[in-house]
């Protein structure tokens, strides 16, 4: 079974829903939606950490630093540090991140395709 590793802001930003008016609310909503997936899920967000309510089994992480590509770098490090990168499916539409994690052996799914999967789960 694959572990999902989700580029949270990339998935949230894949639709113009007005999420930028309530960024923490959009993050919370995504965490709730991720709970329907089969298998383990880790979501990595950019931005200031806050207490996520009712995360269930979703492993919620915030980038270890601020700035450009912070969450991407953490996701790439998570894949690089895995004993079995082939067991990971990274969700992102960021071409550079996708290339980085594919080089390590992880699968990649685009944010739009992933969003459609969540919508029909």
Image (cartoon, rainbow, N blue to C red):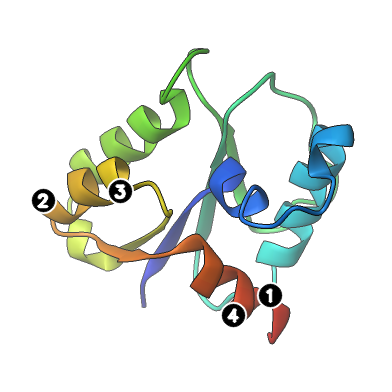
- Report helix, strand or loop for mark 3: helix
First in residue order: circle 4 vs circle 1: 1
23 relative to 85, above or below: above
- Mark 2: few, some, or many residues within 10 Å (few <14, many ≥20)? few
Kindly check if marks 4 and 1 are in contact, taking CB atoms under 8 A apart as contact: no
Q: Which residue is mark 1?
A: 36
- Mark 3: few, some, or many residues within 10 Å (few <14, many ≥20)? few
Q: Which residue is mark 2?
A: 103
**How many badges with numbers are in the image?**
4
Kindly check if marks 4 and 3 are in contact, taking CB atoms under 8 A apart as contact: no
First in residue order: circle 1 vs circle 3: 1
First in residue order: circle 3 vs circle 2: 3
Q: Which residue is mark 4?
A: 117
Quadrant into which the C terminus falls: bottom right
Marks 1/3: CA distance? Answer: 26 Å
Residue 88, how many percent across, how many down?
31, 61
Which one is in front in this view, the residue at disc 4 or the one at disc 1? Answer: 4
First in residue order: circle 4 vs circle 2: 2
């Amino acid at each position: 079974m694959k572990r999902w590793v989700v580029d949270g802001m990339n998935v949230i930003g894949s639709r113009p829903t007005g999420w930028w008016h309530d960024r923490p609310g959009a993050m919370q909503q995504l965490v709730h939606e991720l709970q329907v997936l089969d298998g383990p899920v880790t979501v990595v967000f950019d931005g200031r950490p806050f207490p996520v309510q009712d995360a269930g089994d979703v492993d919620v992480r915030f980038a270890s630093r601020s700035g450009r590509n912070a969450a991407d770098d953490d996701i790439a490090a998570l894949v690089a540090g895995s004993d079995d990168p082939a067991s990971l499916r990274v969700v992102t539409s960021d071409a550079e991140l996708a290339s980085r994690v594919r080089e390590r052996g992880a699968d990649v799914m685009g944010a739009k395709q992933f969003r459609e999967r969540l919508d029909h789960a």
